[in-house]
Image (spheres, rainbow, N blue to C red):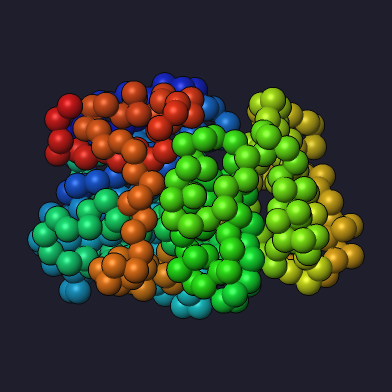
């Protein structure tokens, strides 16, 4: 089968790899209809992770079930499904308590709870930027979708970024009527803004410097804040008459940078501590790493980020962090899409065939104007 393979910093190729197949009785094989390039894929693409060469990438996947193992009883061949990026066993302590993003059984890497398709340190599993994908524990992990092709570009966001954006808002502790600041208008940040508005936020400020991303934020009713124009904290503080916001979402991660392009991994955390009112909450879904050899400082290379914890403590702020447990949210989000209450596909800018993946990676990574979210359709020729 054809698949997108990592071959080194800023190099991905489309190659023939062994076919995905049922390896255990609880497996299914899914024929991929849509798979996305995620912003977190760019950390690997840029050489900022320990991902091994030869890894098949892709953790935002959906498609049609092609085969099932003898131990699969709920999912059937022909089902249209969304594949959560979390690979979870369904029976360990964390899974039973709804934390499928921290499954205790599926990742053999020491010290790592939780697993994912096609990602550094997240287990030995191939990704779904391919024609087919093996799904372990299929009965537990797969989300059934309505038959046909309707809402394809909306449903493809259910595997990761829509639940991740929703999770960021949940971690912040937002209640209806509150003001929210989302830092980062990439796909996850835009999904966080979309989620906050659906959940009843009074106002949502979205901070970025890319004009196309800020325009998308404005198109859904959020308030764009261009941090290259002036200090975003001052802009939001002025708009809230000095009060600040009730909640904040960090959707940038460890490669945060200033308008000049210099990296400051603490930048967004510090800004959120400043702009969220005392006793407010912050949800962090931007990726941070235990080790980052390409970091700007020696401490950051060891995952030590020197952010303003003193003010965070003094203001009585709370913070939630970590990867989203997709299954906690994806059924409800699916139904919001079907009901017309959510339309996460508003971020889609490009739909490409699998063979065009190297171009999609390069342009998305370069933040070329208009390249906001790239979908790959393995069955589509360029």
Towards the viewer: 286 or 91: 286
Query: In the image, is residue 217 above or below residue 302?
Result: below
Horizontal and vertical percent position of residue 197: 49, 65
Percent position (x, y) of residue 149?
14, 55
When asked about the image quadrant of residue 336, the answer is: bottom left
Q: Position of residue 275 (x, y in %)?
A: 76, 56
Left or right: residue 159 versus residue 138 is: right
Q: Quadrant of residue 361?
A: top left
Residue plotted at (21% across, 65% down): 145
Q: Is 118 drawn above or below residue 86 in the view shown?
A: above
**In screen coordinates, is 256 left or right of 335?**
right
Query: Between residues 254 and 277, which one lies in front from this camera angle?
Result: 277
| Residue lying at 52% horizontally and 35% vertically, measured from the top left | 211
What count of labels does the image hold? 0
Where residue 297 appears, as percent x and y from the top left, is 78, 31
> What's the residue at 49%, 72% (across, down)?
199
Toward the viewer: 261 or 100? Answer: 261
**On-image quarter of the C terminus:** top left
Residue at 29%, 67% (x, y): give it: 340
Residue 78 placement, left or right of 364: left
Q: Is residue 224 visible?
A: yes
**Is 36 drawn above or below residue 87 in the view shown?**
above
Quadrant assignment, res 374: top left
Q: Is residue 138 left or right of residue 104?
A: left
The quadrant of the rendering that contains the N terminus is: top left
* Residue 273 seen: no
């Amino acid at each position: 089968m054809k698949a997108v393979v990592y071959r080194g910093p800023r190099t991905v190729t489309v190659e023939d790899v062994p076919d995905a197949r049922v390896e255990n009785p609880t497996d299914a094989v899914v024929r991929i209809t849509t798979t996305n390039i995620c912003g977190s894929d760019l950390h690997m693409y840029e050489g900022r992770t320990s991902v091994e060469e030869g890894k098949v990438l892709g953790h935002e996947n959906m498609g049609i079930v092609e085969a099932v193992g003898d131990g699969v009883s709920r999912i059937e061949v022909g089902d249209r499904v969304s594949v959560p990026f979390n690979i979870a066993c369904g029976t360990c302590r964390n899974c039973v308590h709804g934390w499928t993003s921290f499954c205790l059984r599926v990742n053999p890497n020491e010290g790592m709870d939780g697993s994912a398709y096609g990602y550094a340190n997240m287990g030995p599993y191939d990704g779904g930027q391919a024609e087919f994908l093996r799904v372990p524990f299929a009965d537990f992990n797969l989300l059934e979708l309505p038959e046909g092709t309707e809402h394809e570009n909306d449903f493809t966001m259910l595997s990761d970024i829509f639940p991740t954006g929703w999770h960021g808002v949940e971690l912040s502790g937002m209640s209806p009527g509150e003001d929210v600041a989302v830092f980062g208008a990439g796909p996850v940040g835009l999904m966080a803004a979309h989620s906050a508005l659906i959940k009843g936020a009074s106002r949502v400020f979205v901070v970025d410097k890319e004009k196309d991303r800020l325009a998308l934020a404005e198109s859904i009713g959020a308030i764009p804040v261009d941090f290259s124009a002036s200090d975003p904290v001052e802009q939001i503080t002025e708009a809230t008459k000095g009060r600040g916001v009730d909640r904040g979402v960090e959707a940038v991660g460890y490669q945060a940078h200033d308008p000049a392009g210099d990296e400051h991994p603490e930048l967004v955390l510090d800004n959120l501590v400043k702009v969220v009112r005392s006793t407010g909450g912050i949800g962090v879904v931007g990726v941070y790493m235990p080790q980052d050899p390409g970091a700007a400082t020696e401490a950051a290379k060891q995952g030590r980020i020197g952010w303003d914890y003193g003010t965070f403590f003094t203001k009585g702020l709370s913070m939630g962090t970590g990867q989203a447990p997709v299954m906690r949210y994806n059924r409800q989000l699916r139904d919001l899409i079907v009901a017309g209450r959510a339309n996460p596909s508003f971020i889609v800018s490009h739909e490409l065939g699998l063979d065009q993946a190297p171009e999609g990676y390069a342009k998305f990574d370069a933040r070329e104007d208009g390249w906001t979210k790239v979908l790959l359709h393995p069955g589509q020729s360029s």
